[in-house]
Amino acid sequence: MDFQTAVRTCFQKYATVEGRARRSEYWWFFLFAFVANVILSLIDGVLFGNAQVLSGIFGLAILLPSIAVGARRLHDTDRSAWWLLLILIPLIGFLVLLWWFVHKGTDGANQYGPDPLGNQATTV
């Protein structure tokens, strides 16, 4: 999955947590959000000083797609989306989620749907 396809997919599935998201979908969307936020923060600095107007609006606009793609990424690793709440635990929660997000999803179908990579292996 390339950059444009990943971003388009995340916005098309704006608040959809069903299904699975491959690693490339998650990380391309993460890169898009990070770069856009940096650029908007720079524009905010020039136009508004310390007020983060544009980056704040952008952050609110991508909040739901970010949560949804994170949930679908956890589904790809055969974990419930409720595990996203680990982010509320300082440092440890972030590190655990990062570990899960960088690892390959389960091969074949799991309880959350078919393999987004198209592998037909079955899991027990």
Image (cartoon, rainbow, N blue to C red):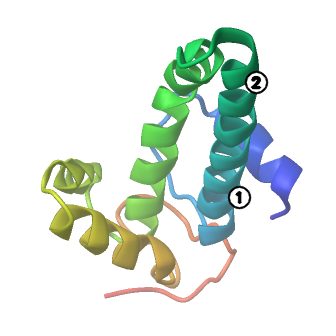
- Is residue 60 shown left or right of residue 8? left
Q: Residues within 10 Å of mark 1 (few under 14, many from 20)?
A: some
What residue would you read off at disc 1?
A: 28
User: Percent position (x, y) of residue 105?
Assistant: 48, 78
Q: Which mark is residue 43?
A: 2
Callout 1 secondary element: helix
Residue at 26 percent across and 57 percent down: it is 80
Residue at 32 percent across and 67 percent down: it is 97
Furthest-left residue in this view: 89
Q: Amino acid at mark 1?
A: Trp
Residue at 58 percent across and 12 percent down: it is 53
User: Percent position (x, y) of residue 32?
Assistant: 72, 47
Can you say which quadrant of the picture contains the C terminus?
bottom left
Does the image show residue 12? no
- Dot 2 and dot 1 residues touching (CB under 8 Å): no
- Is residue 59 shown left or right of residue 35? left
* Residue 21 higher or lower than 16, as above or below: below
User: Percent position (x, y) of residue 54?
Assistant: 65, 16
* Residue 18 higher or lower than 28, as above or below: above
Q: Nearer the viewer, residue 112 or 7?
A: 7
Q: Amino acid at mark 2?
A: Ile
